[in-house]
Image (cartoon, rainbow, N blue to C red):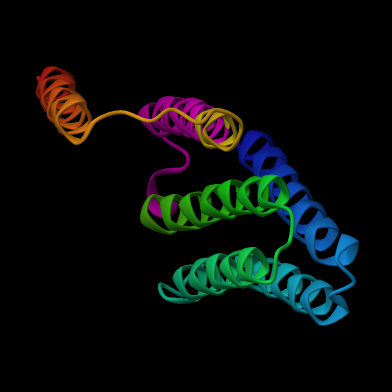
């Protein structure tokens, strides 16, 4: 299963670096491009240093801060959002590998790996799709309907979580 997590990590690193670099580069913000490239190099060092608990978290915070800075500097929101989701995926892979490094050889560990990476891909794909749809669609709902929709969503998610726990 190691090849799957390597492919996912490299794909996420490529997408996040290209998206954020393009976002800054199209606006002529070359310092932002340099920061993104430095963060990519740091992600590679975090991949080698799997014992560090805080390095991936710190890099994720820096990556999010870089994208927010890009949004404030009027960089393309589509590229900034598509640059953050893969960074979240890299963070998740780093944390997951650190937690299960002792169980990699077991059969149930391989099954857990596969299920985790499938759910990670589904969550990242849905998150990017919904956030990009939010950039395109402008829907104005009254406060009461919005609150009701949020409550129904939270209820549904807690029910789904309790069903998955069983």
Residue positioned 39% across, 52% down in the render: 102
Is residue 126 located in the magenta-colored stretch of the structure?
yes
Left or right of residue 91, residue 38 in this image: right
Left or right of residue 121, residue 157 in this image: left
Q: Nearer the viewer, residue 33 or 90?
A: 33
**Percent x, y for residue 23?**
79, 58
**Percent x, y for residue 19?**
77, 52
Which quadrant: the C terminus?
top left
**Percent x, y for residue 93?**
51, 49
Considering every residue shown, the one lying at the far bottom of the view is 31
- What kind of secondary structure does the magenta stretch mostly adopt? helix
Residue positioned 31% across, 28% down in the render: 141
Residue positioned 50% across, 30% down in the render: 130
Range of magenta residues: 101-128
Q: Is residue 166 above or below residue 83?
A: above
Which quadrant: the N terminus?
top right
């Amino acid at each position: 299963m190691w090849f799957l997590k390597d492919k996912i990590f490299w794909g996420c690193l490529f997408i996040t670096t290209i998206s954020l670099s393009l976002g800054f580069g199209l606006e002529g913000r070359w310092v932002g491009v340099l920061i993104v490239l430095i963060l990519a190099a740091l992600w590679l060092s975090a991949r080698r240093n799997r014992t560090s608990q805080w390095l991936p978290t710190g890099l994720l915070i820096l990556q999010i801060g870089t994208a927010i800075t890009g949004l404030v500097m009027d960089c393309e929101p589509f590229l900034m959002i598509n640059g953050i989701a893969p960074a979240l995926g890299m963070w998740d892979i780093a944390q997951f590998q650190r937690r299960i490094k002792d169980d990699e050889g077991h059969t149930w560990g391989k099954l857990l790996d596969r299920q985790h990476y499938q759910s990670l891909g589904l969550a990242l794909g849905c998150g990017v799709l919904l956030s990009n749809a939010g950039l395109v669609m402008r829907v104005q709902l009254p406060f009461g309907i919005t609150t009701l929709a949020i409550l129904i969503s939270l209820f549904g998610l807690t029910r789904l979580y309790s069903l998955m726990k069983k």
